């Protein structure tokens, strides 16, 4: 665990760094996985154990995982809802620090960012705005319904109106993630369909579950495996 001070965000948070078994600062640099809402990925979802098991079975390449803590709820939403300053924080502060202290890749195709709910939305936004740094997005129940004021599903429109980036995605949503005001299922379907129309490589899953860590902890391994597999032909769908 480290305490990381950001001048750009004007705050300080905990970050945790997972290194794979047998990690050394020599040889081929490790892949990178950045996980937002890091405390929950570390303590509610047993991500280190999941990574250990996947690595033991040689199903994923050696990777260094950074668990980025969220602060209070208000700050979290401010940072996660498509905030350009958060992108600058990763680009100019966190990733340079990571590369200074750990033996990691500089290849965007080997760098993944992921999160749940608003973190899934943020992961997709960050990757789009910094596709030279991130090539893979893990979104678990991403809040793609969000938009400023009355402009719902802002990020879907943002992607659709702009040139395709070299990104691949693992998206998932629970069929019970529906309320009177927010329909995660429809928003995720819209985002998925837009990505496929634009020719992105997308693995998409709908499951019979809700907006909670009980389901996310069961599916995170599937998302990582989908992102680490051989690329699909451009424009194809990989839907479960």
Image: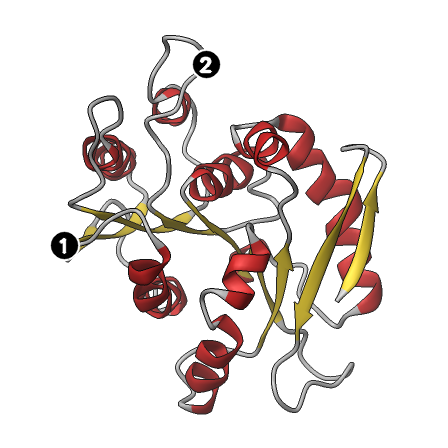
Residue position marked by numbered label 2 in the rendering? 148
Q: Secondary structure at mark 2?
A: loop
Q: Nearer the viewer, residue 44 or 57?
A: 44
Q: Which mark is residue 154?
A: none
Query: Which residue corresponds to mark 1?
Result: 208
Compared to residue 222, the image places residue 53 above or below, namely: below
Residue 48 placement (x, y as % from top left): 53, 76
Q: Nearer the viewer, residue 202 or 69?
A: 69
Residue 25 figure quarter: bottom right
Residue 163 location (% of width, % of height) = 43, 27
x, y percent for residue 159: 39, 27
Instruction: Residue at 50% x, 36% y: name it.
Output: 128
Q: Is residue 180 above or below residue 201?
A: above
Q: Residue at x 62, y 48 (%)?
A: 133
Please state which of the two labelled residues, at mark 1 or mark 2, is closer to the viewer: 1
> Which image quarter holds the N terminus?
bottom right
User: Residue at point 60% right, 44% down?
Assistant: 132
Query: Quick one: label 1 or label 2, which is nearer the N terminus?
Result: 2
Label 1 vs label 2: CA separation? 29 Å
Horizontally, residue 204 falls left or right of residue 117, namely left
Image location (x, y in percent) of residue 76? 59, 36
Q: Residue at x 66, y 91 (%)?
A: 22
In the picture, measured across the screen, residue 11 lies left or right of residue 148, that is: right
Q: Is residue 194 left or right of residue 21?
A: left
Please tell me in which quadrant of the rendered image residue 11 appears: top right
Mark 2 closeness class: few <14, some 14–19, many ≥20 residues within 10 Å: few
Above or below — where is 132 with respect to 83?
A: below
Nearer to the camera, 229 or 67: 67
């Amino acid at each position: 665990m480290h305490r990381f001070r950001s001048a750009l965000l004007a705050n300080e948070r905990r970050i945790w760094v997972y290194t794979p078994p047998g990690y050394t600062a020599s040889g081929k640099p490790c892949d990178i996985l950045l996980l937002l809402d890091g405390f929950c990925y570390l303590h509610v979802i047993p991500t280190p154990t999941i990574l250990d098991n996947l690595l033991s079975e040689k199903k994923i390449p050696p990777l260094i995982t950074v668990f980025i803590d969220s602060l209070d709820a208000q700050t979290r939403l401010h940072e996660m809802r498509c905030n350009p300053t958060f992108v600058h924080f990763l680009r100019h502060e966190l990733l340079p620090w990571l590369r200074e202290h750990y033996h990691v890749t500089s290849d965007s195709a080997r760098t993944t960012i992921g999160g749940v709910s608003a973190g899934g939305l943020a992961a997709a936004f960050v990757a789009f705005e910094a596709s030279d740094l991130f090539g893979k997005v893990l979104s678990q129940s991403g809040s793609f319904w969000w938009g400023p004021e009355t402009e719902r599903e802002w990020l879907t429109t943002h992607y659709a109106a702009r040139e395709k980036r070299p990104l691949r995605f693992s998206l998932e949503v629970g069929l019970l993630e529906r309320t009177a005001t927010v329909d995660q299922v429809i928003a995720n379907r819209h985002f998925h369909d837009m990505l496929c129309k634009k020719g992105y490589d997308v693995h998409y899953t709908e499951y019979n579950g809700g907006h909670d860590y009980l389901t996310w902890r069961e599916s995170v391994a599937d998302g990582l495996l989908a992102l680490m597999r051989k690329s699909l032909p451009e424009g194809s769908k990989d839907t479960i």
